Image (cartoon, rainbow, N blue to C red):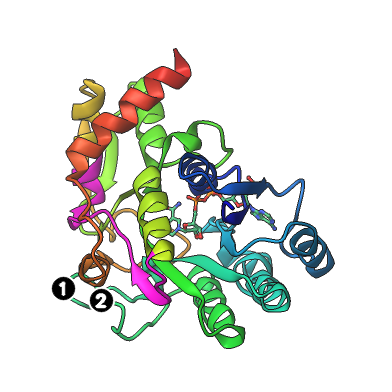
Amino acid sequence: MSQRAVVFGASGQLGVELVRELRARRYDVKGWDRTQVDITDPAAVENALAQFDAQVVFNSAAYNQVDVAEKEPQAAFLVNGLAVRNLALACRQVDARLVHFSTDYVFDGAARHPYVEDDPTHPLGAYAVSKLAGELYAQAYLDTALVVRTSGVFGPGGLNTARGNFVELMLRLARSGNPIRVVEDHVASPTFAPLLAARTIDLVEREQSGVFHVGGGTPTSWFQFARLIFQAAQVEPMLLATNEREYRTPARRPRYSALSNAKMERAGLEPLPPLAQVLVSYFEERKRKTG
Ligand SMILES: NC(=O)c1ccc[n+]([C@@H]2O[C@H](COP(=O)([O-])OP(=O)(O)OC[C@H]3O[C@@H](n4cnc5c(N)ncnc54)[C@H](OP(=O)(O)O)[C@@H]3O)[C@@H](O)[C@H]2O)c1
């Protein structure tokens, strides 16, 4: 009999890839978007899980507006923190494994090495605190929760979401014809959603639990990322490097939040391919979707 899996937040960038990859691996999958199940509603979560007897539950729903969260920290905490408690409690009731996603922003960016899972956390703002709370709730109620921290997620699903992703933002700015300024003093691990989905399911299939980092593989500044995007898209806008001092944002962000995938690789998973190669796949898929 095939394994049964549930995906909450199924229409987000990662959610669509989880559903696709699970179906490709012959799971019996139920994906719910926010209009079908709002994870901040404990009764809705409980009913949904009671109806579909899943062995594994993926939570790809999140409040991801890092700057807006500084104005509405409660909204961020409700989705990223308290709703994960709803999911963990409901998973405990039906004896399902919970797979939850977190962020590189749980770190403060003071490190000079790609962050490993045991590095101390120190979130710098409301979004980051709410995501750390979600990790803690998942682990408070469940012994076998899998928490996957990732970074700078981009996937073709971003073409259909209101929030989009960094690639689509860069393409939009390029079309405007104006010079584009991107910070070069902030370094992260941009991660391709289809690969994040595949590696996460690999971890589940290897019965892994605890915290794992699944980031793009190579520490990359946002400026470098923008340059790679324009190379892959074969467009040449005027791209200028800026820095944190010149480009202020409401939320503080870690300057360096690259993630080490060493633990994932020790578990026997394949390393992630270089970002330039992954962007080629992104643009192929984008072309297929936009015609
Ligand atoms: N995107 C990044 O750069 C990034 C970086 C680090 C970590 N992460 C983490 O990676 C995971 C996947 O992110 P993503 O890029 O796929 O995000 P995304 O594209 O913004 O998708 C998030 C999804 O969650 C849904 N959602 C929000 N509130 C909900 C609620 N109360 N109930 C049910 N669904 C709700 C959203 O629906 P609506 O569209 O209707 O709001 C959206 O479909 C998240 O845990 C995120 O925190 C992302």
Whether residue 248 is visible, yes or no, is no
- Magenta part of the chain: 206-226
Q: What mark, if any, has residue 116 been given in the picture?
A: 2
Q: Quadrant of the C terminus?
A: top left
Going by the image, does 4 lie left or right of 266? Answer: right
Q: Residue at x 22, y 28 (%)?
A: 232
Q: Is residue 279 above or below residue 204?
A: above
Q: Residue at x 56, y 69 (%)?
A: 98
Is residue 259 one of those drawn in magenta?
no
Expressed as whole percent of the image width and height from the top left, the position of residue 140 reads: 58, 87
* Residues at circles 1 and 2 in contact by the CB criterion of under 8 Å: yes
Q: Residue at x 52, y 66 (%)?
A: 99
Expressed as whole percent of the image width and height from the top left, the position of residue 191 reads: 32, 50
Q: Residue furthest toward the top? A: 291
Is residue 209 one of those drawn in magenta?
yes
Q: Residue at x 22, y 51 (%)?
A: 272
Q: Nearer the viewer, mark 1 or mark 2?
A: 2
Expressed as whole percent of the image width and height from the top left, the position of residue 79 reads: 65, 65
Q: How many marks?
A: 2
Q: Is residue 49 above or below residue 266?
A: above
Q: What mark, if any, has residue 73 been given in the picture?
A: none
Callout 2 secondary element: loop
Mark 2 is surrounded, within 10 Å at the Cα level, by few (under 14), some (14 to 19) or many (20 or more) other residues, namely some
Query: Of residues 159 and 171, which is closer to you in this image?
Result: 159
- Decide if ligand 1 comes within 8 Å of the CB at mark 1: no
What residue is pinned by disc 1? 113
Whether residue 261 is visible, yes or no, is yes
Question: Label 1 is placed on what type of residue?
Answer: His
The answer for how far apart the CA atoms under marks 1 and 2 are is 9 Å
Mark 1 is surrounded, within 10 Å at the Cα level, by few (under 14), some (14 to 19) or many (20 or more) other residues, namely few
Expressed as whole percent of the image width and height from the top left, the position of residue 18 reads: 50, 48
Question: Label 2 is placed on what type of residue?
Answer: Val
